[in-house]
Amino acid sequence: MFRDRSSIFLDEPINNIQTPEPIKGSPTAITSIFGLPPLDLDNLEDYENQNQVRLNILKTVKRTQNGKTVVRATKHNSTPGCHDNDYRRIDVAVDEWPSTVLYWLPCSSLIDNQLVCSKTPTCKFTFEHPSELERHEAHCTGVQTVLAKQKFYGSGETKMDEIIAAGYLPESFKSYKNPTKATFDIEVCQIGEALKTISIAVASTLDDDQYFERESSKAEHYQKLVDDFMKYLIELQLKVKVPLEMQNAMDKMDDKLKDMPKSPEKSRIQSFRNHLSMYEQLHVFGFNSSRFDLPILIGGIVKFAAKNDLKCETLKKVSKYTTLKVGNIVFKDVLNYTSPCSLEKYLKQWNAPDAKGIFPHGFFPDIESIRACVEFPPREAFYSKLKQCDLPEEDYAAAKSMYDTKIQNGEWENFSNYLKWYNLQDVGPLVVAISNCFDKFYEYFQIDAMTR
């Protein structure tokens, strides 16, 4: 479901932290806030594991805004940044590294996620890495220049056309499209700004809809939930079959590439092979997943990939996971294929069934409390922080009536049954919508969007 993007992506709640009001303009001292022992500079990773924290160590910088000097924090090659682990993240800054004097960054507005060129007042180019900024500022003139390289003119030739022209596939493959699709959606409990994953739903063109629920609020059961989810996707991917002609073409390319010396021809055949390999992959789509679902699941997915010797590749754009590839499983965001819209509008636009449902994300602290709940939550529990409004009375009444009926009939035992029903509401209709959308892509542009 679509949720508030301002939430912090944490699986475990922050415990025993007294958070003061943020001080605008400068970082706040961290000394007495989190109750941590002195920082062990010799082994930062062991220190984090022992104290169950994840320090994102940035560098303090001074900026001039509207004639005033303010202190901000930014990524820098002289500071260690952030290690990967499952503990709560604390954004801190230092004047120099190493240092035992840390400054807490209580809000994201104190962090410069991008480095901005300041050599000329009209430039404002932004960069992710300090080395890129230094290289740019060495030649910056304040005039923006865009260089373009023309590759095609008046030609609609695709990579599949090139493969056919090279004799690897027959003409009938000009209209071949990848028929397999999968979708996923996660549900969370929200405690303040902390989010805890409680369930994952999957739908596909290969199998019936599947649902995975967290066993308990223990940290190890978060990883087990992600492991079960990924194992199922691997099972789905093994069901992906390509036509015999395509498999023979890939085998033929592999034989040629095996002993071929480096040359333009080898690069060309390798590009053919890479293109055809996309038809063997399982493409898993989420709605707004690059901003919400994947940042929440990424820690567990990376751990799963490491345990199972799977190569994990990411394509990020600022904080968005545009693409995440784990073995032959590729996660993509539907919003990369459409103009900005809500899930409800996307489903309606592409003639898919409505995904109607409500859920009180901020009402339950964990999965145990959901299973213990038998009475339908009060209407106040469904207040939308994103829209800053109460749930319409008629929507609440319809959901409560359905729930009460299923409880009375013995179909459901508690609110976890409702969670399962709600989580599965999105994924099936989304498969239909994506299929209809991609069919139109091909009809009007002769593009198989699954290979993009």
Image (cartoon, helix red, strand yellow):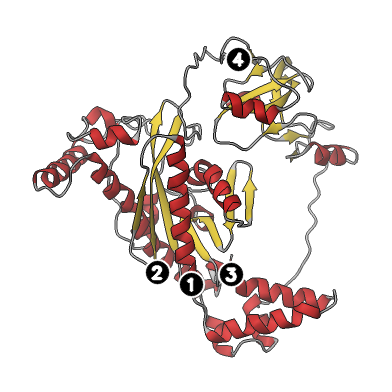
Check whether the beta carbons of the residues at disc 3 and disc 1 lie within 8 A of each other: no
Q: Earlier in the sequence, mark 3 or mark 4?
A: 4
Q: Residue furthest left?
A: 408
Please provide percent x and percent y for residue 92: 65, 22
Going by the numbered disc 2, the residue's amino acid type is Leu
Front position among marks 4 and 2: 2
Amino acid marked by disc 3: Met
Q: Position of residue 224 (x, y in %)?
A: 45, 46
Q: Mark 2 vs mark 3: give the one in front.
A: 2
Q: CA distance from mark 1 to mark 2?
A: 8 Å
The foreground one among 418 and 367 is 367
Q: Which residue is mark 2?
A: 206
User: Mark 3 to mark 4: distance in Å?
Assistant: 49 Å
* Residue 75, image quadrant: top right
Upstream in sequence: badge 4 or badge 2:
4
Which is more toward the observer, 435 or 33?
33
* Labels 1 & 4 near each other (Cβ < 8 A): no
Residue 62, x across and y down, in percent: 76, 19
Gap between marks 2 and 3 measured at Cα = 17 Å
The tag on residue 59 is none
Q: According to the image, label 3 marks what residue? A: 278
Place residue 447 in its image quadrant: bottom right
Query: Is 427 left, or right, of 413 in this rendering?
Result: right
Q: Residues within 10 Å of mark 3 (few under 14, many from 20)?
A: some
Secondary structure type for disc 1: loop
The disc placed on residue 24 is 4
Q: Is residue 339 above or below residue 386?
A: below
The crowd level at tag 2 (other Cα within 10 Å; few <14, some 14-19, many 20+) is some
Which of the two discs, 3 and 4, sits closer to the camera?
Answer: 3
